[in-house]
Amino acid sequence: MNVRRSKINILVDILRLVQRKEGRAKPTHILYGANLSHARLKKYLDVLLVNEFIERADKGNHVFYRITLKGQKFISEFKKVEELSEAFGVPI
Amino acid sequence: MEILIPTRFYGFDSVTYTVAAVIGFLVSYYAFKMYSATSKRTHKYLYLSFTLLSMGLLVLSVASWYNYFNYEIYHGKYLLDQYVAMDDFAYWIYYLCSILGYLLLASMYFPEKGFPLLFLPVWSSGFPYFNVLSLFILSYAIFRSVANFFSKKNMNSFLVAASFSLIGLYHLLLVFTSFSRFVYVIAHICLGLGFFSLLVMLAKVSRK
């Protein structure tokens, strides 16, 4: 079944991806990992940066993203939301 | 319809309603957190349904405690009944809150346009059939939660399915309270266990 991802699911997918890369997540990694267009990725990254869930680190010519403590807490809270949703049988 | 209640059970039903209301508010709080994170219609319905159910149970528990103290301490001198029929007032609020709560719970599993359709059988039915009506509406949520358990096969979905089934059983048993005093006791045990299942599920999820 083809299920469209909600905005919150995309944001969490990006956050999880950034978390997995342990501070070395390049925009291209996120782009392919989260399966998004460049324009949409930029929009979602801006949301995460504004909310301080991720932070940008420039190293030479490269741009990296790393997850903040607030972002990690958000992921763990969202995991509870997913579990509760699954328990009641309602999709997120 | 006559409701047979064992005298020794007086007070225990009040405790059951109070505990169920507290757990219901807890579920509502978690559902609100889910809704805040996702802004999903389903989560909003879950949060509103448990808020309404808990409000109804809270009002019922107040009325039940009032009856208990009047019976046990004031020996039948119903202090406020000269001003307002406490029982009738409380039960009407409880019925209304519960029916709306169950409707929202069932609507949570319906597609977007299902909610207005679900209203149809409710407002054409009458007050004395509250428990049958509750069971009728809740049966859809029971069916969906049981189906969810069989597809997920995990403990949390089992606890939710068990909870909805036990609350449904509570309403079913209350229909037969005129036959035996024992039925009333079993019904309330089912209600207590139903909400306890939800508490266990919440504890399991929030502990992680």
Image (cartoon, coloured by chain):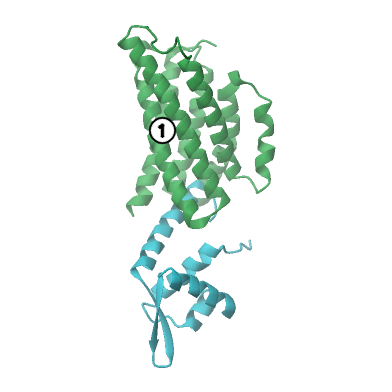
Circle 1 SS class: helix
Label 1 crowd bin: few (<14), some (14–19), many (20+), radius 10 Å: many
The quadrant holding residue A77 is: bottom left
Inspect this view and state whether residue B198 appears: no
Residue under label 1, please give it. B21
Residue at figure coordinates x 57%, y 64% from the top left: A5
Q: Quadrant of the N terminus of chain B?
A: top right
- Residue B182 in percent (x, y) is at 42, 16
Q: Quadrant of the C terminus of chain B?
A: bottom left
Residue at the left extreme?
A: B73
Residue in the picture at 48% in, 13% down:
B3
Up-down relation of residue B119 to residue A92 (above or below): above
Q: Quadrant of residue A51?
A: bottom left
Looking at the picture, tell me which residue is in the foreground, A75 or A54.
Answer: A54
The chain letter for the residue carrying disc 1 is B
Q: Does A21 appear above or below B32?
A: below
Chain identifier matching the cyan colour in the rendered picture: A
**As displayed, is residue B122 above or below residue B79?**
below
| Residue furthest to the bottom | A60
Describe residue B14's horizontal placement relative to residue B117 as left or right: left
What residue is drawn where x is 41% and y is 55%?
Answer: A80
Q: Indicate the position of residue B69 as horizontal and vertical percent values.
A: 33, 15
Residue A41 location, x and y as percent?
A: 54, 76
In the rendered structure, the colour chosen for chain B is: green
Can you see residue B31?
Answer: yes
Q: Looking at this view, is B114 or A59 the one in front? A: A59
